């Protein structure tokens, strides 16, 4: 039996309220734990730990943009589920679903803090 369960990355944000609204209301995650500047979100087998910046010891210096890749079984099914809520996001914050030249079908969604959430599955080989 494997000892590894899942990866739950920390996402540093400026506004935890906006981040939680985005993940819960747009992407269908559920907040399982919440403190003042920290929350744990989960959907199926994917978790995120959201941490609101607390001054200079918050997010790493430099470019705040991070990309998080979530492997799914069917990007188009997920897109159909999320589309009504994705349509409420600013134009340009959603890209796809699209077949990529590196053999993945992907849906890219830009979170309020500039973090990129990518959903994808491998394309079947011909």
Image (cartoon, rainbow, N blue to C red):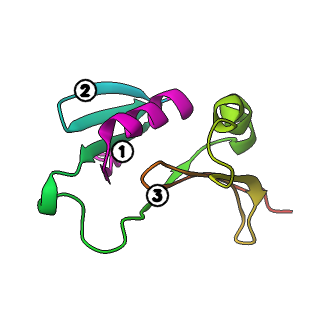
Q: Which residue is mark 2?
A: 33
How far across and down, in percent of the image, does residue 50 sit? 30, 43
Q: Nearer the viewer, residue 4 or 107?
A: 107
Few, some or many C-alpha atoms within 10 Å of disc 1 (few <14, some 14-19, many ≥20)? few
Q: CA distance from mark 2 to mark 1?
A: 17 Å
Q: Is residue 11 above or below residue 101?
A: above
How far across and down, in percent of the image, does residue 25 sit? 51, 27
Left or right, 21 with reference to 109 = left
How far across and down, in percent of the image, does residue 36 sit? 17, 32
Few, some or many C-alpha atoms within 10 Å of disc 3 (few <14, some 14-19, many ≥20)? some
Q: Residue 6 got which mark? A: 1
- Residue at image x 22%, y 52%? 53
**Residue at the extreme right:** 126
Q: Residue 114 got which mark? A: 3
- Residue at image x 35%, y 49%? 7
Secondary structure type for disc 3: loop
Q: Quadrant of residue 106?
A: bottom right
Sequence-wise first label, 3 or 1: 1
Q: Nearer the viewer, residue 56 or 100?
A: 56
Few, some or many C-alpha atoms within 10 Å of disc 2 (few <14, some 14-19, many ≥20)? few
Secondary structure type for disc 1: loop
- Residue at image x 70%, y 29%? 84
Residue 40 sits inside the magenta stretch: no
Q: Where's the N terminus, which quadrant?
A: top left
Q: Is residue 32 above or below residue 58?
A: above
């Amino acid at each position: 039996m494997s000892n590894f369960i899942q990866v739950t990355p920390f996402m540093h944000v400026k506004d935890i309220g906006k981040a939680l609204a985005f993940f819960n209301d747009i992407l269908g995650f559920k907040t399982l734990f919440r403190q003042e500047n920290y929350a744990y979100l989960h959907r199926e087998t994917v978790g995120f730990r959201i941490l609101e910046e607390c001054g200079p010891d918050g997010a790493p210096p430099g470019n705040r943009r991070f990309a998080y890749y979530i492997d799914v079984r069917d990007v188009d099914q997920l897109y159909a589920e999320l589309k009504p809520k994705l349509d409420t996001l600013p134009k340009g914050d959603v890209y796809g679903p699209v077949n990529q030249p590196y053999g993945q079908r992907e849906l890219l969604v830009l979170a309020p803090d500039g973090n990129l959430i990518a959903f994808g599955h491998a394309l079947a080989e011909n």
